[in-house]
Structure formats: C-alpha cells, structure tokens
Amino acid sequence: MLIGEHKHTLDPKKRLSLPAKFRKEMGNEIVVTRGLDSCLFVYTVAEWSKVAEQFSKMNMLQADSRSINRFMLAGASETEIDSLGRILIPEVLKEFAGLRDRVTIIGVHTRLEIWDEDKWKEYKGAIERDADKLAEKLGEAGAI
C-alpha cells in the first residue's frame, strides 16, 4: 500500500528521485499522467491497466466520458525508474502541475501523487481546516 508524504527536489533535467519506500512497490516501469487538483498521478503499469480498463467501459456517446478519457489517457506517459531511483517528468506534465524545484510526493493507496510543494501545503491546509466537516458529511452519506 502506498502511503505517506515525502519532500523531494525536481532537478533541472526534470528528474525526480522517488522515495526508496515507494520504489520497492512501484517496480521498474510506471505511468505518470495528469491528475486532479493540479497534481500528477503515478501508477504501476498493472494498476494503470486497471484504471485504463475502467475508462474504456465509459459511454463514449457522453461528452463528459470522452473528455475525462482524453484528459487522463492522452496525458499519460510510460517511464522507467532509473538505477538511481529517478523518473523523468515530461515537460507537458511538469507544466500542467506547475512543478518547480521543490515537490511533495504522497502515497494514496494505489497511486502516488506529485505536487508542487507550495500547492500541496495550500491544499493540505484547506483539508485540515475542514476535515471534521468533511468526515461528518461522508459519514452521513454512509461512506465512512
């Protein structure tokens, strides 16, 4: 299971070292794609296959289904983890997520998320302020 929060640096060549804890679970090849909330999603190849399969089951006659398919699949990039544990972030994905030199990598069960450090601090702060209300709302809906 991928969990935890780690701060790292994106080097000038757009390479990012994954935490050793995550490298063990991710394997040698991964898929990086546009995520939601202005971050990047990172999947193992096996997990990405499951995600892509779910997208393929969507009704392509609906505009929203076509749009999310294009957003997630067209933005995806397969990449290898090098011998030093680094991945290359494609320029288009770096720009999408607004990544600068300091990033935060978080584990979210079956995927990693890569955030610009300042964006993550802002997002996390907002969630922390509203966590009790969010938990209550989800509890009322039967999600927790």
Image (cartoon, rainbow, N blue to C red):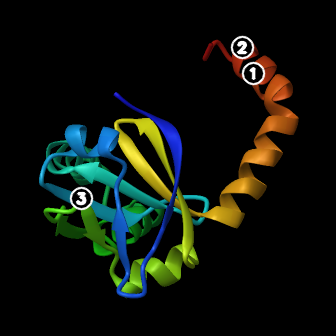
Q: Are marks 3 and 2 in contact (CB under 8 Å)?
A: no
> Which comes before the other along the chain, label 3 or label 1?
3
Q: Position of residue 101 (x, y in %)?
A: 55, 77
Q: Position of residue 97 (x, y in %)?
A: 54, 73
Please give the label number shown on residue 85.
3
Q: Position of residue 77 (x, y in %)?
A: 24, 71
Amino acid identity at mark 1:
Ala
Please tell me whether mark 3 sits on a helix, a strand or a loop.
loop
C-alpha distance separating marks 3 and 2: 40 Å
Identity of the residue furthest to the front in this view: 84
**Where, quadrant-wise, is the N terminus in this rendering?**
top left
- The mark lying in front, picked from 3 and 1, is 3
- The mark lying in front, picked from 1 and 2, is 1
Name the residue beneath numbered marker 2: 139
Amino acid identity at mark 2:
Gly
Q: Give the class, few, some or many, for how many residues have Cα within 10 Å of label 2's Cα (few <14, many ≥20).
A: few
Q: Is residue 64 left or right of residue 26?
A: right
Please tell me whether mark 1 sits on a helix, a strand or a loop.
helix
Q: Are marks 1 and 2 in contact (CB under 8 Å)?
A: yes
Based on the displayed image, in which of its 4 quarters is residue 34 positioned?
A: bottom left
Amino acid identity at mark 3:
Gly
Name the residue beneath numbered marker 1: 135
Q: Give the class, few, some or many, for how many residues have Cα within 10 Å of label 3's Cα (few <14, many ≥20).
A: some
C-alpha distance separating marks 1 and 2: 6 Å
Q: Residue at x 14, y 43 (%)?
A: 46
